[in-house]
Amino acid sequence: MSGAGVKPWAGEVVSIHVAAEGSAPMEPRREVTAVPGRGLEGDRYHAGVGTYSRKMEPAREVTLVETEALDALEREYGYRLAPGASRRNIETRGVPLNHLVGREFRVGAARLRGIRLCEPCSHLAALTDARAHKGLVHRGGLRAQVLEGGAIRVGDALEVVG
């Protein structure tokens, strides 16, 4: 049996969150617009007021995290992060994000490229519990660059390109 035409992964957007400025609470959105070189409209990095905006780079445009990783955090460490509490922009289901480093993928109408893993930072540790930090090492999500802009909505597909 040939694998021709079979997509390696197909997932979906479960939730979307943005913060108006660095350290501000993450706010849920049903839809956002991804903009190349800027990130997500309404988010701190798009506006240039994120904690690390002085070091703006493609890897800061969009962050994603798997709901499966958040479920594992609760199962293995007894710690539950509410939607958006991971400080990631997009929560997904059905795609192993670690495997998208260096790969292009579509999320809704936008095309992104996985740049590197999004390991838990000291800011997340300060907002949560040591269990959250420890439980998300190597599964804290993915940093991505926007290659082609477009709308991203809750329920949209996430598919690898090529």
Image (cartoon, rainbow, N blue to C red):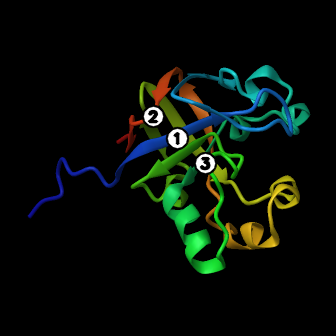
Q: Residue 26 or 148: which is nearer the viewer?
A: 26
For the C terminus, which image quadrant?
top left
Q: Is residue 35 left or right of residue 109?
A: right
Pinpoint residue 9: horizontal percent, then vertical percent.
34, 53
For residue 161, the mark is none
Pinpoint residue 133: horizontal percent, then vertical percent.
76, 67
In this view, which residue lies farthest toward the left?
Answer: 1
Pinpoint residue 111: horizontal percent, then vertical percent.
48, 31
Q: Residue 148 or 118: which is nearer the viewer?
A: 118
Q: Residue at x 83, y 24 (%)?
A: 48
SS state under label 1: strand
Q: Residue 24 or 135: which is nearer the viewer?
A: 24
For the N terminus, which image quadrant?
bottom left
Q: Is residue 147 left or right of residue 129?
A: left
- Mark closest to the chain's N terminus, 1 or 3: 1
- Mark closest to the chain's N terminus, 2 or 1: 1
Amino acid under disc 1: Ser
Q: Mark 1 and mark 2 in contact (Cβ < 8 Å)?
A: yes
Pinpoint residue 29: horizontal percent, then vertical percent.
58, 29
The Cα atoms of the two marked residues, 2 and 3, are separated by 13 Å
Q: Is residue 99 left or right of residue 120?
A: left
Q: Mark 3 and mark 1 in contact (Cβ < 8 Å)?
A: yes
Q: Residue at x 18, y 47 (%)?
A: 5
The Cα atoms of the two marked residues, 2 and 1, are separated by 6 Å
SS state under label 3: loop
Amino acid under disc 2: Val
Name the residue carrying label 1.
Answer: 15
Name the residue carrying label 3.
Answer: 83
Name the residue carrying label 2.
Answer: 154
- Residue 19, relative to residue 125: is it above or below? above
Amino acid under disc 3: Pro
